[in-house]
Image (cartoon, helix red, strand yellow):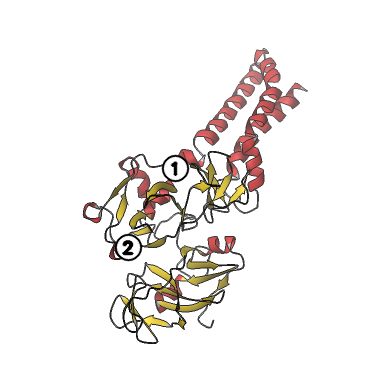
Amino acid sequence: MKLFFFAIGILLLIGMEIARVYYIMPFPGSQVEDTIQLAYFIGNYIWIFRLIGVGLIFYPAYTFIKSGNLVVKSTVIAILVFWLMVAYSFNFRFLADKMFYQPEQKILVKSDKNKIFKNQLVIGVSLNGESKAYPIEIIGYHHQVRDTVGGVGVMITYCTLCRAGRVFSPTVDGITDNFRLVGMDHFNTMFEDSRTKSWWRQVNGEAVAGSLKGKSLPEISSEQMTLGAWLNLHPESEILQPDPLFLNQYKGLENYDEGKTEGRLEMHDSASWHDKSWIVGVAMGLSATAYDWNDLLKKRVVNDIIENEPVVIVLENDSSSFHVWSRLVGTDTLQFSIGKRPGNLIDQKNNLWTWSGECTVGTLKESKLRFVQAYQEYWHSWRTFHPNTRKFSSGD
């Protein structure tokens, strides 16, 4: 009977330590099923499982070690050491926030002191007359960076396994909170708030487990483009610089912008509509549409309608920066194409428009197109969280 209780206790101790991390980290098979509630339950009650396990093994382990049988004594000690090694690994090495740390030094500078290459991708935010740019190869390691833009607290987030950048207000029911990286759900970064310990998806800011389940963080408008394109639109912008303490960690994401990393989870599939293919996703109301990146590279301009809203998707000359705007200006529905001069668009009325969405020549001069939030993502990520997505094709 002592052996039975010892075996059950050890299996419980080791199994719960592994399960607590396995379900919320990208281990083989862990991100496929809807196990987030189970993972949350185990995480919340892990100390109860530990106490039960220790209670089951304590007396049997004591008697086995005190026995004169050297084989039994050595075997039990070896099993206990193995359990301690598992507990250490899954509490201090494999947890998300033990692998990816927040920046110690948040360095933002103007363009004259900037060391980030102009062709690197950034997540740009502009609020109340202030603009800031956050390179994705920096925030991709940290997963989130907290800052203030135009007097507004912001939470800049990025998930490299989804290729998804989002910016949120870190407020829940009017209360500003702190968030830590806790793991992943369906290969999407997940955060835990400090107040209620609820878990939040990065891709949409929704709480998926805990007392705040169903709540959502307010999203703040952002754009992804090259730093050069961002500075053309916002020349006074500040740019986040690498934290000197994490230079080696940033090297793991070198060339991530271009999709040239070798990791299976962060690779780029150059084909269309494969799991790791790039798309531009737009969600409006109950509808979502995905635009193949290869198609955008060929066309540069796509005119479409989503939820009865005429929209235009535009890829700049650098083949990296994109914009999505409404095509409605007053009572006019415009149809766009690339202008003859580099760096502008033209509509069917021969009005010229810049990459900032402003009309500079024509009858609509000084008009500005309305911004539509859009994201560049991996196709597998977008369809996971927007299962009813329409795949745009040229015949639409």
Instruction: Pick the quarter of the image with the C terminus.
Output: bottom right
Name which of mark 2 and mark 1 comes first in the sequence. 1
Binning the other alpha carbons within 10 Å of mark 1 as few (below 14), some (14 to 19) or many (20 upward) gives: some
Q: Residue at x 30, y 75 (%)?
A: 343
Q: Residue at x 47, y 82 (%)?
A: 331
Q: Amino acid at mark 2?
A: Trp
Instruction: Pick the quarter of the image with the N terminus.
Output: top right
Q: Furthest-left residue in view?
A: 112
Q: Amino acid at mark 1?
A: Phe
> Circle 1 — which element?
loop
Residue linked to disc 2: 230
Q: Position of residue 349 (x, y in %)?
A: 38, 87
Q: Quadrant of residue 165?
A: bottom left
Q: Position of residue 277 (x, y in %)?
A: 48, 66
Say which mark, if any, is on residue 100. 1
* Residue 219 in view, yes or no: yes
**Height in image: 315 above or below 68?**
below
